[in-house]
Amino acid sequence: MLTNDKVPLIREKALWMRRTAFTMVHRAQLGHPGGDFSAMDILATLYFGVLNYDPKRPDWAGRDRFVMSKGHATGALYSALCAAGYFPEDWLSSYMQPKSLLNGHPNRNYLAGVETNTGPLGHGFPVATGIAIACQITGATYRTFVLTGDGEQQEGSNWEAAMVCGHRKLANLTLIIDRNRLQQGAGTEETSGLDPLDDKYRAFGFDVAEVDGHDPAALLAVLGAAPGTRPRCVIANTIKGKGVSFMENVASWHHGVPNDAQYAQAMKELV
Amino acid sequence: MAHAAPTAAGFQDCRNSWVKTLEDLAETDPRIVAVVNDSVGSSKLNSFQKRFPERVINVGIAEQVMVGVGAGLANGGRIPFVSAASCFITGRALEQVKADIAYANFNVKLVGQSSGIAYGELGATHHSIEDFAWLRPLTNLSVIVPADAWETAEAVKWAAAHEGPVYLRLSRMPVPDLDIPNRTFRPGRAQVVRDGGDLTIIACGTTVHLAAAAADALKATGIAARVLNFSTINPLDEDALHAAAATGAIVTVEEASVRGGLGGAVAEFTAGHRPVPVERVGFPGFLPTGSVDWLFKEYGLSPEGISAAAHRALLRKG
């Protein structure tokens, strides 16, 4: 399939995932919708345009791995895994309810398709590095993708991982940074500035690309490209809360939850 | 005290046992890999590295990614032994141990080297006496403290075969082989080193042979002390603890903090089931400058100190 032929499907899935995630958050009155929505097009592109996986064989050794390092964005991850066929839709209404398999942060022991438990920031990238090393030393061909938030890049463990990836030339690993420029209380650059992120990752030995994180065609072009000779860093410029007018670029929607009127308004916009 | 004297007859450095066993296992199981933080030498992995160069992943001085990489290697079907000084693999990377290994329940073997106060004069930054308290509450994580070279080899073999996360706490201080007839290593089960019914001395790791010596001295004064080699701290051998409580008095001995470690675990158990006096021998907290020998003696980790604790426990037993 030509890359751009996948775009309509990705857009359709991303819309379903946004409606689904917001419904989960509204019902639970818990969640992190701002970061869910900035990451949604990235996840839709991965699951419906890039990753090689089989939901019927979640432990298949040759699967591509996706590690959701920004583990609080379970609205995005769970709607993606559900859309990809890992669990039935009727599980979604249990989000964060007592004993639900859909915990506030993902648990691989609860849910097929979750590669590792995340939640505390700065954990997913090091684990993805280990997955990519396993691939490298065994001569396997699967690819490993990891998504971090941008504020998450303030965690030092990421830079330990970046050093290892660069040193070992882990070409099968792609780090995606959800660059929405907001962390929970304020902008990243007012808090502890990250720019220039591209130069930082180049200096650590990565090939760096910067794309519009809401443009499936642009994401497909860079995420779907064959591995090069070095690890890849994709800085995806995004908008926190993307797709719902009153959430966009508003930091308080990091873990804000909608009332009934806001939910109804969002459902009108998400069509 | 002969305890830490590397030349003492019959004393062995358990690290030799660890690495020989690991090499033997790696020879037949290609999934076994080692992950280190620039700790090839201190983990005694030089010969392993020579034999299996591509199977040593040295991430540099970076414990968080070291433990995370261990989880990732397990995801990729490897059996990683992540080996580093126990003070750093636990304290520096504690959240990774909790979230990436124990909570995620990955098949990773964490190997804490030079544990307890093996670094002696280097001080509290390099002592690892808090690790039991930090790791004991972590669901899924087996915590194993071999008492001698034989048990080290058995524990490494078991860890490699066991599907699940393990913390192996090794020492670099030479210890004698325990003399236990028909011995078997069963994780989660204590071994009776000396039998007796007046009280029970529950020891682990480097202190078991000291507890045995204390029991022998007590026996000469007419006191029959049972000594348990409590080599699994998590999960606890509850049957052995019920039986220990039935002797009416308990002494715990560990090369670790008396707060939250083996002694803490035993006290929790007895308080909940059958309250009996528990005297805890170990370290009270950050320690003053001193050699391993001096610190052991100063804090009562000696046959004399353990005997004195036994007498205190018996007095409280009444």
Image (cartoon, coloured by chain):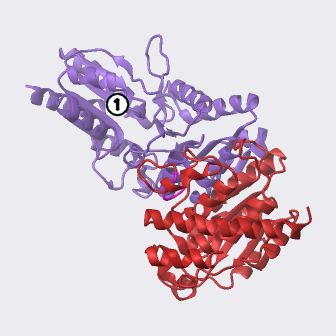
Front one among B267 and A86: A86
Magenta residues (range): A102-107
Front one among B297 and B97: B97
Chain B on-screen colour = purple
In the image, residue B102 lies at what x, y percent? Answer: 51, 46
Say whether residue B105 is magenta: no
Chain A on-screen colour = red
Front one among A252 and B119: A252
Overall secondary structure of the magenta section: loop
Report in which chain the residue with disc 1 lies: B
Q: Is residue B301 visible?
A: no
Q: Residue B33 is drawn in which quadrant?
A: top right
Q: Is residue B173 visible?
A: yes
In the image, residue B44 lies at what x, y percent? Answer: 63, 42
**Quadrant of the snapshot with the C terminus of chain B:** top left
Residue at numbered disc 1: B203
In the image, residue A254 lies at what x, y percent? Answer: 50, 75
Q: Is residue B272 left or right of residue B109?
A: left
In the image, residue A271 lies at what x, y percent? Answer: 66, 75
Q: In the current view of this chain or complex, which residue is farthest to the top? A: B182
* Residue A230, placed above or below residue B145: below
User: What amino acid does circle 1 point to?
Assistant: Ala
